Amino acid sequence: MNRSLQDLVALLDLEPLEVNMFRGQSRDLGGKSVFGGQVIGQALVAAQRTVESSVPHSAHAYFLRPGDMELPIVYEVDRVRDGRSFSARRVQAIQHGQPILSMIASFQLPEDGAEHQSPMPDVPPPEGLRDYKELAAEWLQAAPAETQARVRDALLRQVAIQFRPVAPWNPLQPQRHAPQQCIWFRAAGALPDDPQLHRSVLAYASDFNLLSTALMPHAFSFLAPDAAIASIDHALWFHREARVDDWLLYAMDSPSAQGARGLSRGLIYARDGRLVASVAQENLMRWRQPK
């Protein structure tokens, strides 16, 4: 387990403040504000702490304000409903006295039922693919000096998740591509046998790479200096249990972009082909058009 993963596990272990209130710390991942996946993962932890035997099956979050990386985040949980099979929780992530994220999570007691799923795409296994950090180092070396200075930290910063793209897309030399990509990912080390922790790390990791999928048809990079890009909302459905410290395949596409917003979708598969989770996200996409 690398230091970033150790730090992520610590970030997801929220401090209880009062009944239904928790506090989590923040980290700088090289962006302009707190990484959205961190807030989603921590909000899910806060909601899970107020539920007894049920497990989360869906979470729907709206990003309301940029998060301050220098301050902790307070999570306030509203126990909206506890039914016989389902429970609902509303979570507000608060900084400076204002919500930066609002999320509704639904929980269900485990039960059997009919099953079907979309098949996993036929892609090469992760063992034969190069790690994103290795690719990023090469892309950076070939970039102009001013670009290297501006994006080095963002590209080479150690993170808690490993990524191996099936068809790498260089954000420093973006070219037009169909808005589809598949990326293998896993936690950068072994995690404890705690299903709640694995679900929270999965929620954290689900926020990576969706935004770039919507940018691919436009040959535009999230690293561009004139970009104003951010997640607007994030929806996540948990289908089946899986370990996040084993390789998972993230198959993403973007069916539409309009009104300075892009919609991205993702299906997350375990190595054995089981569909683990589904994700949808809408992103803000603004940049200055060349004259």
Image (cartoon, grey):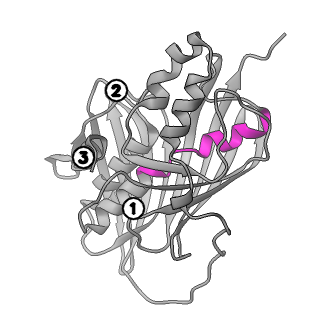
User: For the residue carrying disc 1, how many other residues have a C-alpha within 10 Å: few (<14), some (14-19), or many (20+)?
Assistant: many
Secondary structure beneath label 2: loop
Q: In this view of the protein, which residue sits in the foreground, 245 or 37?
A: 245
User: For the residue carrying disc 2, how many other residues have a C-alpha within 10 Å: few (<14), some (14-19), or many (20+)?
Assistant: some
The location of residue 11, given as percent across then percent down, is 26, 43
Q: Which residue is mark 1?
A: 244
Specify whether residue 65 is in view.
no
- Specify the amino acid type for callout 1: Val
Picture disc at residue 6: 3
Looking at the image, residue 128 sits to the left or right of residue 186; the answer is: right
- The answer to if 25 sits in the magenta stretch is no
- Specify the amino acid type for callout 3: Gln
Secondary structure beneath label 1: loop
- Specify the amino acid type for callout 2: Met
Q: Quadrant of residue 170?
A: top right
Task: Give the residue furthest to the right.
Answer: 291
Q: Which residue is mark 2?
A: 69
The location of residue 38, given as percent across then percent down, is 38, 42
User: For the residue carrying disc 3, how many other residues have a C-alpha within 10 Å: few (<14), some (14-19), or many (20+)?
Assistant: some
Q: In this view of the protein, which residue sits in the foreground, 129 or 31?
A: 129
Task: Tell me the chief SS of the magenta region.
Answer: helix
Q: Which residues are magenta?
A: 204-218
Which callout, 2 or 3, points at the residue further toward the start of the chain? 3
The location of residue 249, given as percent across then percent down, is 55, 61
